[in-house]
Image: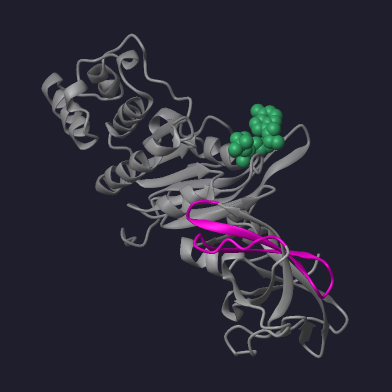
Amino acid sequence: MTDQKLTPRLEIRNLTRSFDGTQVVRGVSLKVMPGQVTCLLGPSGCGKSTTLRMIAGVEMQDSGEIYVDGSLICDTKFRIPPERRSIGLMFQDFALFPHMSVADNVAFGLKGAKEEKRARVEELLKRVDMLRHIDNYPHELSGGEQQRIALARALAPKPRIMLMDEPFSGLDNRLRDDIRDQTLAVLKDEDAAVLLVTHEPEEAMRMADEIALMRDGVIVQQGAPYNIYNNPVDKAATAFFSDINVIRGTVRGALTQTPFGQFLAPGVKDGAEVDIVIRPQHIRIDLDRGGRGPNPTAVDGTPARGVVERARFMGKESLVEFRMDYDGSILTASVPNVFLPKPGMPLWLMLRRDRCFVFPAK
Ligand SMILES: Nc1ncnc2c1ncn2[C@@H]1O[C@H](COP(=O)(O)OP(=O)(O)OP(=O)(O)O)[C@@H](O)[C@H]1O
């Protein structure tokens, strides 16, 4: 007997798909547990939507298998049709039926007695706080309200899996966060396994239990948002979540000497180059005291001097660009908005050691 708790609701193994001789999905494997939200995150064109469409059954894979609750639903020889996969879909352009009322839209995929259907429609509309609009038509609703109806419609037949492709991208910024949070609460209540495609890291971090970071048709890293952000697998994965600063160094005896002190580079050959990567918010700034900076510490390493090139007030923070004395390169630090130094001001920069990543240079 299989243990229901340990069996993924959705599992894909080694999915591949080519178009016109180019492989756009190259061996993608993934598991999603019931009640879990996994975000497939990556830049435009990396193969996210194609992966989702294969799971939905509207696109056929060239190889690989798809399982639901441990049972095969599709490989290259066997294929359960889309409508029998117990999958709810919510896409950005998945419009409501304009000629149908909200009630009829939500009831669209439901089977059974009229009263039962009505009860389920009312239950879901209540859940998305739209019961008062049950007799309205889509054109009478705002974008955010339509989105909530689309969610209710997708969830009405109690799908075991929800596939969502950029479902919030049509909404304006202020609306989006509320709808995301509300959607997440409803999805958790329904206990479906959710696979959500997005190219926005903030959205993935807000929604996901797990992020699968995709690039060029493969998943390059998978894990909880905290781990993906704090232990990125390479420079590109770091840069996907924020701006980055890169300090290049050469390895001698498993150490890299930089103007900011030494960094460990275990396993890297002598003479090879490495990139020390740090996000702008993890650079510390200190005052110049007649050409001298603060003392080196274990936490912040050795300070290096730079001159403010440009400082921009961003609201929550200021972005300050420095031209570094040691080689004229530019480093960017993000600092709380109370601090907005003038161009030309000399300051000392330190790198928070625990926030530096060391990657072999490509
Ligand atoms: N039906 C198709 N025919 C030919 N090429 C396709 C087809 N569908 C997708 N592609 C190509 O496959 C690649 C991956 O597309 P896909 O839509 O999966 O990427 P994506 O990561 O979802 O990007 P986006 O966020 O821009 O939709 C793209 O280069 C796209 O042009």
Asked where in the image residue 352 lies, by quadrant, the reply is bottom right
User: In the orientation shown, which residue stands out farthest toward the front?
Assistant: 290
Asked where in the image residue 160 lies, by quadrant, the reply is top left
User: Left of 244 or right of it: where is 185?
Assistant: left
Residue at the image position 67 percent from the left and 79 percent from the top: 288
103 or 68, nearer to the observer: 103
User: In the orientation shown, which residue stands out farthest toward the top?
Assistant: 99
Say how the picture is coloured. Answer: one colour
150 or 326, nearer to the observer: 326
The quadrant of the picture showing ligand 1 is top right
Residue at the image position 37 percent from the left and 19 percent from the top: 96
Residue 127 shows in this picture: yes
The spot of residue 251 in percent (x, y) is: 82, 82
Quarter holding the C terminus?
Answer: bottom right
User: Left of 85 or right of it: where is 299?
Assistant: right
The spot of residue 256 in percent (x, y) is: 78, 83
In the rendered view, would you say 102 is above or below 218? above
User: How many labels were placed on the picture?
Assistant: 0
The spot of residue 109 in percent (x, y) is: 31, 24
Quarter holding the N terminus?
Answer: bottom left
Asked where in the image residue 121 lies, by quadrant, the reply is top left
User: Left of 122 or right of it: where is 139?
Assistant: right
User: Left of 186 or right of it: where is 356?
Assistant: right
User: In the orientation shown, which residue stands out farthest toward the right?
Assistant: 271
Residue 72 shows in this picture: no
Residue 94 among those drawn in magenta: no
In the rendered view, would you say 138 is above or below 319? above
Q: Which residues are magenta?
A: 314-343
The spot of residue 220 in percent (x, y) is: 63, 58
